[in-house]
Image: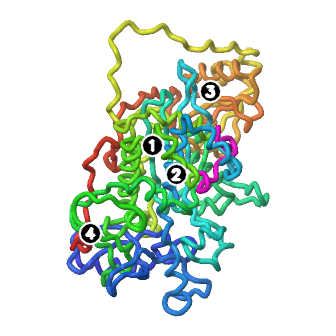
Amino acid sequence: MGQDSARRAGARGRARDARGRGADGGSYGHAADAGAGTTVRTATVPEQRGPGTAPGQAGAGGGGRRGKDGGGGGGRSSRRRKKQRRFRALRWIAGVLSLLVLATAGAGYLYYRHLNGNIRSGSRTGGHSDVNKPKANAAGQRPLNILLIGSDSRASAANVALGGGKDLRDDPPLADVQMLLHVSADRKNASMVSIPRDTRVDIPECKDAKTGKDYPPTNAIINTTLARGGAGCTLSTWEKLTGVYIDHWMTIDFAGVVRMADAIGGVPVCVQENVWDHPTPAVPGGSGLRLKAGTTKVKGKQALQWLRTRHAFASDLGRSKAQHMYLTSMFRQLKSQNYFTSPMKLTGLADAAIKALKVSDEIGSVPKLFDLGMQLKNVPINRMTTVTMPTIEDPQNINHVLPKPGDADQLWSLLRDDVALDKNGKAKSSATPKPSTKASVPAPSDPPAQTAVTVFNGTGGDQAPVPGRARTIKELLVGKGYGRAETDSTQKPQKDTTVLYPRSALAGDAQGVAKALGVPSSGVHQSASVTGVTVIVGADWREGTTYPKHEKPKAGSVPTSADVLNGGKKDACMPVYKPYQW
């Protein structure tokens, strides 16, 4: 970035996010120093010095929400900001760590039973979704997808004490950190996929399960979903965006997370150069992180600063990578200290983790969380991969981003097909293959001429819908004997073409329709959202009358723009943006 771009950075950094707070609360800008030569995205709200820091040195506190008086600095508004936004980056770590902790309960299982009273839960979904559960493999296993959400809520005294903003308790929360944990059906590999909080997406119609309030569909940045019906709305938005069925959600409260890092003696992290994330003339924010080049074991305040650091790591995307490094390093640390086999070591961690969570109803008990965790326990560290959804700059707002066409869906297709993001799995044996265990397909209950079929156009979404697509496929069905086929003009954008049926008695008829169209049986699902056999022509079939063959992507075929980090990379080290080197 040249000096003209550097001068523009200051103006961009002052843009505010959906709640009207400064960019440190959630918007994209460009960090630059005089003479800097690299384009980056970062936020630029003034940072307040934490207690005990020397003049000119940034403290742990970060810029945050604007006060209710709307003031941008000084006075009571400035004092409020001093306490706000300090711990947002850590709270979601509790969710991942909770799974790791619960996975190791073993002999200490009875201890965790008393924690049931601390578990809070809510409805799995807050909006309508046509995404169906994937088919089970030959062993009856399905992939497991859990959405981890970091909320900025100030709804408790503990959160106010850590994050400040006692006058903001009634503000609707934002989903500042969002990460999908995917565990393969055979439980041999796992991945964690982040979406930047300022990604503009289509948000479906949602309903708040507590208040009954309905929220119409909209197009907005994804962190606003938590205020539009709770975590269930965030989950529904992810399903709409990715086409991936999500089993559960976890929202993370940040109380107690710092002492969890302390309990394991800190987490090793690495920087390539000396780093000091301090205010500069162009970018007045900063986390206060100050480390020498090389590896340092961070805990307490330093752990918080590492997870909050944005400017010195060049952008929000750089901060996501640093968070990924922290998580995989923590996992290695837990294994090296035998936390997975020592109930005594887990006592304090489990208590803090459970108190930090709110989960979807299906997993709202310690035994269920224990069972869930046990499915993650044996995933090798070199089979755990972290990535960030590829993005491009939003032409409507420089502080927002959009999913990168092609690359983003390539990533989602890997998850939809349950293909490992790494290449570290064992090669398939050349021995005689086992006999097929495919389930038999039920026979249709009615001949095609008597089978009613409704066809919807679902080719929209990332691209404009193809006009007349439902009519084309309806005519194809009529030509194959389905004279009762008809169209519905309602648009139902989705990634893949599916055939749905409402009750088991119609399963054979749905399979017959799928066979007539050339849609594989894996695209046939039972759904309570339809009243009869229904075809939704997805974005994968935008032209022609022959259903395109889908080649399953190869393991490890992740686009390079996804910023891949494998858990087995012990020497991972963050580069430091030049203005923040010392």
Spatial CA span between label 3 and label 1:
43 Å
Q: Which residue is mark 3?
A: 524
Tag 1 near tag 2, CB within 8 Å: yes
Spatial CA span between label 2 and label 3:
43 Å
Q: Is residue 410 visible?
A: no
Q: Earlier in the sequence, mark 3 or mark 1?
A: 1
Viewer-side label of 1, 4 = 1
Tag 3 near tag 1, CB within 8 Å: no
Amino acid type assigned to the residue bearing label 2 in the image: Leu
Q: Earlier in the sequence, mark 3 or mark 4?
A: 4
Q: Quadrant of the C terminus?
A: bottom left
Question: How many residues crowd mark 2 within 10 Å: few (<14), some (14–19), many (20+)?
Answer: many
- Is 296 a magenta residue? no
Q: Which residue is mark 1?
A: 339
Location of residue 78 in the rendering, given as x and y in whole percent from the top left corner = 51, 87
Location of residue 404 in the rendering, given as x and y in whole percent from the top left corner = 41, 52
